[in-house]
Amino acid sequence: MIMNDVVSINGELFPLIEAKIPLLDRGLLYGDGIFEGVRFYDKKPLLHIPHFERFCKSAEYIRLSPPSLESYNHEIKKTIEASGYADGYLRIILTRGVGKMGITPTGYGKPNFYVIVTNIALYDKSLYENGIELVVSKSRRIHKDSFSGQVKSLAYLPNIICLWEALESGATEALMLDCDGYVSEASVANIFALMGNTLLTPSLEANCLEGVTRNQIIKLSSKLGFNVEEKLFKLDELLEADEVFLTGTGAGVVPVASINGTKFKIDRSKKIREVYESSIKDNCQAL
């Protein structure tokens, strides 16, 4: 039976709108879990292994045992097939499971493993042609010594607060600086700047996520004709860029029209998006 939006909960399939999770699931109560967002095309996940490897690293960081690659693949394939979608979006979630109330993370049984298949569109299509407006958030990216930015945690409230700042100011997205004032990332995307022949992106020292799409753009840089620099840099340097764009699994490559009112060209950013999108088919893996 074709379900369209569907979820696998510990191997059992449900229409997404009918699915239920226990109120004592620690992912719900405390954000005690991790996730990956993955695009798929022609039923094949995009950049599958890098996403799985990051999923495992996130799980290990919070002391969870991730599923095997065989089990992971089986649930993804089964859920995509049940949905009937050829192209779509996967949200893969692992939580510590269900137990007694209280934050103590020990004494739990088997983790809960969820695979959601749906569609996602973070930005309107017109923004890919005209660029998005960013504002610099007053909130800072959490320091790497407090919590690693490489973990895809369920606790996304700081990012949501930053995004509220942007929406309330009439912008589309928020740019976060780290605790030392260096450019880090947007609320749901990595950031790049074009400066002549240089493609500049924040070092992971700024506690930005090591995005899978970010890394793919870096790999494509020679084909795009750019030299890549990953380093710490302040906002004033970013505002001197010729062009700025964002990258992410859900977003793809999105040109930035302005940051705090400073305007940028979007010509080469749109070309980068075209090159990235032309590489998608070659980077999808059959399960």
Image (cartoon, rainbow, N blue to C red):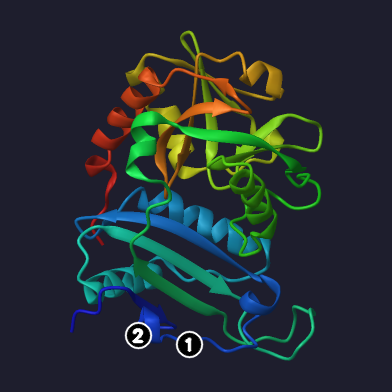
Residue that extends furthest to the top in the rendered view of this protein: 196
Quadrant of the snapshot with the C terminus = bottom left
Picture quadrant of residue 131: top left
Residue at x-position 62% and y-position 44%: 166
| Residue 127 position within the rendered picture, expressed as x and y whole percent measured from the top left | 39, 37
In the rendered image, the vertical position of residue 206 relative to residue 92, given as above or below: above
Point out the tag, 2 or 1, that comes first from the N-terminus: 2
Quadrant of the snapshot with the N terminus = bottom left
Residue at x-position 70% and y-position 50%: 148
Picture quadrant of residue 74: bottom left
Contact? badges 2 and 1 (CB < 8 Å): yes
Return the residue at label 2: 14
In the rendered image, the vertical position of residue 103 relative to residue 257, given as above or below: below
Return the residue at label 1: 20
Residue at x-position 67% and y-position 71%: 32
| Residue 249 position within the rendered picture, expressed as x and y whole percent measured from the top left | 42, 48
Q: What SS does tag 2 mark?
A: strand
Amino acid marked by disc 2: Phe
Amino acid marked by disc 1: Lys
| Residue 5 position within the rendered picture, expressed as x and y whole percent measured from the top left | 31, 73
Q: How many numbered marks does the figure carry?
A: 2
